[in-house]
Amino acid sequence: MTTHEVLNQVPPLAGHDAADDPALLDALDREGAGWAAAELHELGRLGGGEQAIEQGRLANEHPPVLRTHDRHGHRVDEVEFHPAWHELMRTAVTHGLHAAPWADDRPGAHVARAAKFYAWRPDAGHGCPISMTYAAVPALRHAPELAARYEPLLTATSYDFGLRAPLAKRGLLAGMSMTEKQGGSDVRANTTTARPDPDGTYRLLGHKWFTSAPMCDVFLTLAQAPGGLTCFLVPRVLPDGTRNPMRLMRLKDKLGNRSNASAEVEYEHAVAWRVGDEGRGVRTIIDMVNLTRLDCVIGAAAGMRQGVITAAHHAAHRQAFGRYLVEAPLMRNVLADLAVESEAATVLMMRLAGATDRSARGDAGETAFKRLALAVGKYWVCKRWPAHAAEALECLGGNGYVEESGMPRLFRESPLNSIWEGSGNVAALDVLRALTREPEVMAAFQAEVTAAAGADARLDAAVRRVRADLSDPDDVELRARRVVERLALVLQGSLLVRHGHPAVADAFCASRLGGDHGQAYGTLPRGVDFAAIVSRAVPQVG
């Protein structure tokens, strides 16, 4: 007689194509990047493969370690990573997730990159330096001479880790260093100073509270120059091979994102090159911030997709009370609700990527749309992820609460994107600022939403409610989150009604716009085509 026979356990979710996502693939064609489908599937198979999943686990279980000094007492300021981290980074860089669109003239290059960034998610932590390198390029272009030297290396598809003079390397990664302990999101309160030198460089003196990915080669940072808050490029190693006095004081002990290093840094008269004019630091670095905000939306949408396919895979293989969980009406409701949220996030993410691509090519209308829609999407999609991750975890029962399932790591990751690059209040206030100062952005947004006019009465009614919200000037800051939420919902509804699967669009309008929805996931109304929605979320393994 055996005492340990394994029965009714779900097979591993490995060996699937992470790009096999109907909402993603439809949007890839729609937004002008169908040409990238083959490479997207190649990366998706890698991302859903056993090797990459194991690399993600190892990178998180062996987080980075700071070495401030060598054994002789010399200051080194090195961050050590597990080999799995480097393999994840190498895959991302060689597939151009870090900055390839800036060297690719094809329409849809930014869309292709967004789709690949979405599909390659065995570990979210390594996405931070990938995202910042992507976002650094347009900000660096405010200094054409610097861009001419550094951009070819930032866009190169060679992962060349190590402390060496940047221009002597085969490829570079860029980080960001803005936040200070006294200011947080209020970067104009920064106290780090920048003293100009006769050779045209500056010397930075101050302390940064959060420096993202301190092992990168160069950083965009903000400091107070004589002319005001200014953006600077700071290399870790100077052109002569000596180390710039950029001291790593400690690594942050974070809730999630454990495989990635975030550091406190002190500049001890570090050498820096000015990017843009003195006093225009925020306007310069906002180009970087906007693109990292896009990646926050992509990351949250990808996290939702990972959560729902994990839950659906479990429910399709786990039996309870004489049937598979996926056959139980209440579980179908939960899975369908999670899938609707996921697809709404994905279709919005890809629309924002399309706007980014066309904006980069000079489309003024898309630039105006992106200005508002990106802030709206950053607020809403990132805000929805933590509850989505918690519900997906619960679908696995006790197994979901165990680290081996991968769901606790997903759950710990979920609050990050809402905090990074402006927390919920910052994003909501940014929406209000755009609405009050830039009338063309609301016109572009309304044109997008009303493209679905007449297609669904629930959507039409929601659009009318949004207009009423915006016409009421009283206590607008107090109501900012409510206003932004409704803007996000009508935008997602319009996109789904025009481009989504009919069952998903109907369920979204019935629950998110029609008001027939409870406070928890799994409260979709009767009449929803649960089977059609859930079938889109069950991954094909093997």
Image (cartoon, rainbow, N blue to C red):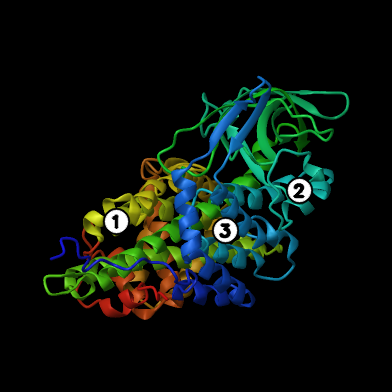
Can residue 412 be spotted in the picture? yes
Q: CA distance from mark 1 to mark 3?
A: 33 Å
In the displayed structure, would residue 362 be above or below residue 380?
below
Q: Nearer the viewer, residue 26 or 354?
A: 26
Q: Which residue is mark 3?
A: 370
**At x 65% / y 53%, what residue is drawn?**
134
Mark 2 or mark 3: which is in front?
2
Instruction: Point out the tag, 1 or 2, that comes first from the N-terminus.
Output: 2
Q: Amino acid at mark 3?
A: Lys
Q: Are marks 2 and 3 in contact (CB under 8 Å)?
A: no
Query: Where is residue 338 drawn, in percent x and y?
Result: 32, 64
Q: CA distance from mark 1 to mark 2?
A: 43 Å
Instruction: Point out the tag, 1 or 3, that comes first from the N-terminus.
Output: 3
Q: Which residue is mark 2?
A: 141
Q: Which residue is mark 1?
A: 393
Mark 1 or mark 3: which is in front?
1
Q: Label 1: few (<14), some or many (≥20) within 10 Å? A: many
Quadrant, the N terminus: bottom left
Horizontal relation, residue 210 to residue 21: left or right: right
- Mark 2 residue element: loop
Can residue 32 be spotted in the picture? no
Q: Which mark is residue 458?
A: none
In the displayed structure, would residue 226 be above or below residue 104?
above
Location of residue 253 by image quarter: top left
Quadrant, the C terminus: bottom left
Query: Where is residue 491 drawn, in percent x and y?
Result: 44, 64
Q: Amino acid at mark 1?
A: Leu
